[in-house]
Image (cartoon, rainbow, N blue to C red):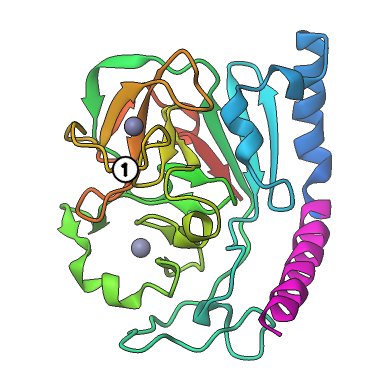
Amino acid sequence: MKFKNYQTVFLYTLAVIFLSSCDSSSTSYSIEDNGNDSGGGSNNTDLPAGFSKFISEYTDVYISGDYVVVESAGVPNHSSPYWGAGHPNYAAPHSNMVVNPNIISEQNFKFYIPLNPSISSSSSSTPLGPIGVSISGVPFYNQYAGPNNQPLDNEIPSFDSYYGHPQQTGQYHYHWEPTYLTFNESASMLIGYSLDGFPVYGPTEQSNGQYPSNLDELNGHSHSTNEYQDGTYHYHATSTSPYLIGGFKGNYGSLNGGGYFTN
Ligand SMILES: [Zn+2]
Ligand SMILES: [Zn+2]
């Protein structure tokens, strides 16, 4: 019974995303075509292995110039009270949840992730708003609730069962480990990318299933992973602040004042 419900929800979401992406197809595909022309081949064969983790039902991933572009509607691939009562994906709030007044709305995200990330000589603090993207196309936000580094504490009770919530304009996001992904696959899986181009993993290591003990102040460190056999800097989700990405170790996109567009 449970499975059946999820299946219905999934198909509905798929339909919604398909319909909504039609609106923007003319713009997005002209960029993709340009990339193909200059690259002289299929974009997807050149994508770094980690990008194959993106869920194709929810994201469009392709190379454009020096970036991997991830397009998404930014909506979660799971139930939430924030879909609003009457929506097929609606779920009742979990016990103790303090539901905020916002409702999930579809976005038109284009995340520009550096194709060849490089470590910056000085790390930089993350901005408010999207700082990365999960493999389901939902943005990652940082460890703060607002300007002046307000801690998240007052917002945490409004997280749904999978640790996400929408802000005032309906933009759904995760400040914490996206547990719908990790509980269903693995706590050590690649869960997304930071806008500086480095991957973000779940709370444990693929090699031994243990929690990393040597994370830097940004929640990152370097070693080889299943997707990066030669080794890479990467972030891990943690249960304490900064939770996902404590700051950019690399140079992040300069487009639109950040590494993403939405319109
Ligand atoms: Zn938030
Ligand atoms: Zn690691």
Q: Judging from the image, what secondary structure is the residue with disc 1 in?
A: loop
For the record, the magenta segment spans 1-22
Based on the displayed image, in which of its 4 quarters is residue 131 positioned?
Answer: top left
Image position of 59 with respect to 196: above or below: below
> Nearest the camera: 42 or 237?
237
Side of 47 where 252 appears, left or right: left
> Nearest the camera: 56 or 165?
56
5 in the magenta segment = yes
Side of 5 where 160 appears, left or right: left
Quadrant where the image shows the N terminus = bottom right
> Nearest the camera: 94 or 165?
94
Q: Residue 159: x, y in percent? A: 37, 72
Based on the displayed image, in which of its 4 quarters is residue 257 positioned?
Answer: top left
Image position of 45 with respect to 195: above or below: above
Q: Label 1 neighbourhood size at 10 Å, few (<14), some (14-19), many (20+)?
A: some
The residue at the point 75 percent across, 28 percent down is: 31
- Camera sees residue 250: no
Side of 17 where 215 appears, left or right: left
